[in-house]
Image: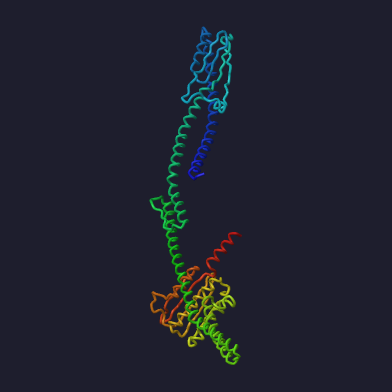
Amino acid sequence: MSLRFRLIGLVCLALVVSLALGGATAWVNASRSVRTEMRSALLVGRQTIESAIERLQQAPDPSRGLDELVASFEGNRHLRVRFIGEAQAVAAPVVESAPFGAVPSWFVRVIGVVPVADRVPITVGGRDYGTIALETDPHNEILEVWNEFTDSLVTPAVFSSLTILLIYLFIGRALRPLEALAEALEQVGDGRYRTRIGGRLAPELARLRDSFNRMAARLAAADTENRRLNEQLLTLQEQERSELARDLHDDVSPFLFAINIDAASASRMLTEGRATEAREYVQSIADAIRPMQRQVRSMLGRLRPIGLDEFGLHEAIENMIAFWRRRRPEIRYQLSVSAGCDGLDELVGRTVCRIVQEALSNAVRHASPTLITVSIDRRGEEVRVEITDDGRGLSEPSRPGYGLVGISERVRAIGGRLGVSSKPGGGLDVEAVLPCCSLQEAANASVQAEEL
């Protein structure tokens, strides 16, 4: 059932309950009022007859006086008077008509007042002239109550009809913006984040409209950012593939070519029985394999930090520092990894390694530092990674290198933040704050918690 008809139903229920309570109260009062009126009419009629009998004690013709007494009750609304004696005389009450029709029998039964009779003996001058019978007739009084009841129903009926009509129209008008909001939400659910709601609304609905428009704007911005991140990710992937292809072509392919030639020569020498000369070609093959192994190991380290899965984050960072220490021994390196960092999520751990790898590479290749400090600290549900050096710093602070841009995209993709700033007096400070678990892991944990 719609909200409009629910409200109308509640109003109708309230009106019905109010009418029922009011009707019950009116019934009790009406029944008491009719009974009181009948008792009063009967008492007044008896007192009138008794007073008339006292006056007739001195009358020359009591019979005529009795006829006049009965006739005096003509037009009475509540009493039927009948003289029972030598002569018969009857005075019946006037039956009134109702503007809303005759009184229904059920209403008479609800009032529950029945006629009451009384008899007054007539004795004048010691002579018995008969009896005057009095009987109450509640018809006119019940008719009066019925008229009041029907009159009192007209106003509530008109009020109820107008109220229901106004509720129907007002609620329909008030719900129209909500229907527009529901349609707008469906459009946003379909990915149309440019949807907006306009127009003048009530203050409560205006706040809802403004909140929806802000939400849609943020979703549109997030969608644009996601598209940009995907494009950036594809660009980074293509760059990494190009670098790997170049390294394979420039560093590995010549060694493979040389190994192929030496292997063919060694095979020919062995076929010709020249084992001593063949040994030299075999040694050349071994000499070519060693640099090729180092190059392949270096490429694997770029694809996946060496030691991260086997020994943990601390060992993986130590391997990176050892790589550069062998090549640039004049630079001092300091490493600090707090307890608990080896239990990080796999994606977060790889991101930490990439941050350190890029910062070390930039510092060694471009900054000419004398000291590089690497600090990894876990604080509650966050990991803080900081790499500082005392080198030249950024030549163009407003335009970081492509590698730092790629690292920034990685950090933001898992819900972290990255800051790069030049230190006073020279040097560079790269600081990243990451969640201890990736967004996907957090979502999975949330789903599992809801299922439990």
**Color theme of the render:** rainbow
Locate the C terminus and report the quarter of the image it occupies. Answer: bottom right
Query: Which residue is farthest top?
Result: 60
Question: Which residue is depicted at the point 55% across and 25% down?
Answer: 105
x and y, in percent, of residue 16 in the image: 52, 37
In the rendered view, would you say 362 is above or below 130?
below
Quarter of the rendering containing residue 338: bottom right
Quarter of the rendering containing residue 300: bottom right
Number of callouts: 0
x and y, in percent, of residue 428 in the image: 44, 79
Horizontal placement of 338 versus 185: left or right?
right
In the rendered view, would you say 134 is above or below 227?
above
In the rendered view, would you say 418 is above or below 78?
below
x and y, in percent, of residue 349 in the image: 54, 73
Question: Which residue is depicted at the point 45% across and 62% down?
Answer: 223
- Closest to the observer: 69 or 29? 29
Horizontal placement of 258 versus 203: left or right?
right
Question: Which residue is depicted at the point 48% across and 29% down?
Answer: 150
- Closest to the observer: 102 or 64? 102
- Closest to the observer: 47 or 112? 112
x and y, in percent, of residue 71 in the image: 50, 13
In the rendered view, would you say 77 is above or below 22?
above
Query: Which residue is farthest front?
Result: 272
